[in-house]
Amino acid sequence: MSRQVTLAVCVRVLRQLRRDPRTVLLLLVVPTALVVLLHEVFSGGPAFQRIGGPLLGLFPFVSMFLVSSITMLRERLSGTLERLMTMPLSKLDLLVGYALAFAVLAACQALLASVVALGALGLDVERPAVVVVLAVANALLGMAFGLSLSALASSEFQAVQFMPAFVFPQILLCGLLVPRAEMAGWLDGASWAMPLTYAYDALARATAPASLASAFWADVAAVAAMTLGALVIGAATLRRRTP
Amino acid sequence: MTPSVVLRDLRVVRGGTAALRGVTLDVESGRITGLVGPSGSGKTTLIRSIAGVQRLTGGSVRVLDQPAGSARLRGRVAYMTQSPSVYADVTVRENLAFFARILRAEGEIDAVVATVGLEEHRDQVVATLSGGERARVSLAAALLGRPDVLLLDEPTVGLDPVLRRDLWATFAGVAAGGATVIVSSHVMDEAERCDHLVLLRDGGVLASATPAALRDETGARDLDGAFLVLIERTADR
């Protein structure tokens, strides 16, 4: 692995995004707009206070999942991945370069949404800084899954459909809408296998008044482990030789 | 002189059909070798095999005394694919800066831009370029890092005749510097510019010789005629 090459990948991904200001604007503004909408829907009441904080940390998972799966799919379809695979670049350089670029973007996204939610909308959560850090971690989780799932897509239409197929069930089951303890047993069981469950749980604990116990750190460790696992799978899908 | 690219009984099956049926071939460095044949004859598969990106069914490919695709060859073997493999959403310079950084060849960017005649489009986003210009960005990226083996899949399709002549002069210059240059083409008049020709048909090598030797041996006046004679000869057998 080379730091120079990793940084080159990061800079290139950020340049691609910079040339597409509308995407950047959407990435930054949409989560903030949705938080405002959420505030209005619940009239800023207790439901907003309960799910607002965790939601701030979950937006980056969803958007980075989409952006990274499409970017990597384009890299595969345009032949640039094949060119890179003939060059002195390790797969790790490529994946870490992507991760750095998306982490920067996710941090901006989460900061903006948090400032608006906490400042203008009166969202009251414990440890807002932890929420932003978790948001970046969740962005990397989403990115890792997006990168590896992009290998299963052979067109952008398919990649976009992965979003309702893989992300929506996780949002339904992670505990954000209904506490997992109140779900049917098989749903609760399924939620244990889903990365977003741990991401949500960590956020719910971070935004609650109780002190951060070992359960919080277990969630964080699960998110980190699942990110690494997905990246390893993602690296395995980057083939130097293809049929 | 030892050949820089050595293929022995190379067989490749792509999409259920045999793309290469036992190709044995030696390619020398210091000259331009043309891969000529109709569409579907196996030119791209052969180039991909030498680049090390093709999964092989059987046989072997060695490049510069290493198995094709081995880590030591990365950066020494450059491959320009038939459709331009560059990033459409950034500028010409940003594309080349990225590849140059990986190849540690940042100092060569201006030179390769000039070689492919894109000085005026340097700061233009690739998506806004014409098809031929995009192909030239892809070619410029392949020239970065002074590769020892330069693999070009149909590099001059759709280009202006003056530029085409200049690019062939560039390829000759690269070969004269001691590199191995392999160029595929389905246009016979381009084949005349090669030092050595490999005629491919249906995944097999029909002939491997200099253009002059091919004409002499077949008694044909041009390479198109030579190709026809060779095809009819194999059909008779």
Image: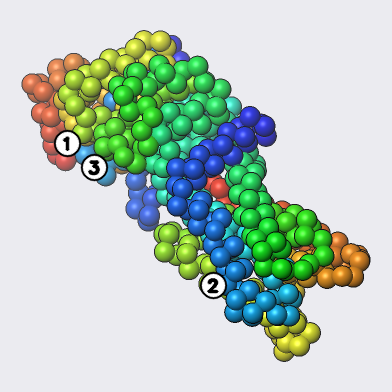
Name the secondary structure under disc 3. loop
Name the secondary structure under disc 2. helix
Residue linked to disc 2 = A165
Residue B110, by quadrant, is top left
Horizontal side of A105 relative to A17 (left or right) equals: right
Disc number for residue B231: 1
Residue visible at 73% across and 87% down in the picture: A183
Q: Residue furthest left?
A: B221
Residue visible at 66% across and 51% down in the picture: A107
Three-letter code, disc 3? Ser
Give whichever of B13, A54 is nearer the camera.
A54
Three-letter code, disc 1? Ile
Q: Position of residue B40 (x, y in %)?
A: 26, 44
Disc number for residue B39: 3
Contact, CB < 8 Å: mark 1 with mark 3?
no
Three-letter code, disc 2? Ala
Q: Nearer the viewer, mark 1 or mark 2?
A: 2
Q: Position of residue B231 (x, y in %)?
A: 17, 36
Residue visible at 55% across and 27% down in the picture: B101
User: CA separation, marks 2 and 3?
Assistant: 40 Å
Question: Which quadrant does the N terminus of chain A fall into?
Answer: top right
Q: Position of residue A74 (x, y in %)?
A: 45, 50
Q: Position of residue A4 (x, y in %)?
A: 63, 29
Name the secondary structure under disc 1. helix
Query: Which mark sits nearer the N-terminus, 1 or 3?
Result: 3
User: CA separation, marks 1 and 3?
Assistant: 15 Å
Horizontal side of B161 relative to A154 (left or right) equals: left
